[in-house]
Amino acid sequence: MSLIRLGILRGGPSDEYDLSLITGSTIRENADKNLYQTVDIFVDKNGVWHIGGAPHQPSDAAKKVDVFFNAIHGQYGEDGKLQSILESLGLPFTGSSALASALTHQKHLAKQRFTELGIKTPYHTVIHIDSAKDIGATALHIFHKFSLPLIIKPVSSGSSYGVMVVKSFIELEVALERAFQYSSSILIEEYISGVEVTSGFIDSFRGQDVYPLIPVEISKALGSVRDPRGKSNHHTPARISEDYKKNIIDAVVKLKDALGLKHSATFDFIVSPKRGVYLLEIDTVPTLSDESVLVSSLQASGVKTSDYIHHLVTLARYGN
């Protein structure tokens, strides 16, 4: 039996370039050598595809591949652009469609959908750079509208790039300037004190149409944000009530269907003892590394990284 040519797309133009290289390496190292011949497809910061050091058009690269594994995080890899290219090639790839990826990557649009479905998300507003030419005046407006602390996030950035927990007016100005370096629109979000929990799903796994991953707790101090490489200070199965776990799993399953997500994704929540469960955002191309939150969640569910990779590739190959 000939080996399946697995094209691993990594790199890309976003600020998560280094993170993508790590995920791509994890996939290459854990792909079953008895089943797959891995083809390293490096996408540079200008969006040019390379195989073996030589530039290739996506259509030419497709001739060397049976199925693609998308390991590109953030801009290009999660916002629908890469998915549009892959869909036009007519070859299978892991992850969600271009439309679902684009909607989920835009945090404010995703939050609108959360609210429509009755899933709680922190109070927030969006500011575009064109309306924030005077950073001082913009900071003052936000200061009067929100209680501190609050969180500043680029609308279309991934991981923790450009994200800052703001505890003073001076920090607010700094956070606005920093966030606008990553996105032309930024999300201003209330800070909810509680336990950060990550869950997610795998499609068609262990006899379930949607297999929910065990919620994993992320422990960190106020003012810190998760390491962009997917690390955190600590992550273990979440020590929260069964009711909260059920709320999280119900939200994952509901949004998986409502947003048209495919194969796998992770969901970040805050669980507040006083206010309940709030959904923060969804990651359609989760980080894969020995210390990533996804791998911790897989391990808590008794799933090997190699089995997870093989399952996603199988789903992609057979159009599931």
Image: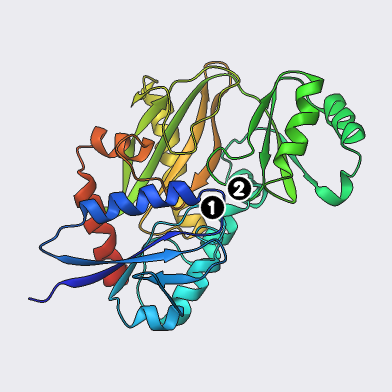
Q: Amino acid at mark 2?
A: Ser
Left or right: residue 47 compared with residue 72 = right
In the picture, the quarter occupied by the N terminus is bottom left
Q: Which residue is mark 1?
A: 74
Mark 2 is surrounded, within 10 Å at the Cα level, by few (under 14), some (14 to 19) or many (20 or more) other residues, namely many
- Which picture quadrant has residue 192? top right
Q: Taking the image as drawn, is residue 300 in sight?
A: yes
Callout 1: SS: loop
Callout 2: SS: loop
- Which picture quadrant has residue 153? top right
Image x and y of residue 100, in percent: 52, 61
Q: Taking the image as drawn, is residue 205 in sight?
A: no
In the picture, the quarter occupied by the C terminus is bottom left
Left or right: residue 2 compared with residue 146 = left
Q: Amino acid at mark 1?
A: Gly
Q: Which residue is mark 2?
A: 157
Q: Residue at x 73, y 32 (%)?
A: 175
Along the line of sight, which residue is nearer the eye, 303 or 247?
A: 303
User: Is mark 1 in CB contact (under 8 Å) with mark 2?
Assistant: yes
Position of residue 11 relative to residue 7, above or below, is above
Position of residue 139 relative to residue 185, above or below, is above
Image x and y of residue 46, in percent: 57, 66
Position of residue 28 relative to residue 88, above or below, is above
Along the line of sight, which residue is nearer the eye, 272 or 180?
A: 180
Q: Residue at x 37, y 30 (%)?
A: 216
Along the line of sight, which residue is nearer the eye, 162 or 56?
A: 56
Query: Which of the two labelled residues, at mark 1 and mark 2, occupies the earlier sequence position?
Result: 1
- The type of colouring in the image is rainbow
Image x and y of residue 125, in percent: 76, 40
Q: Residue at x 51, y 71 (%)?
A: 48
Image x and y of residue 69, in percent: 34, 63
Instruction: Give the Cα distance between marks 1 and 2.
Output: 6 Å
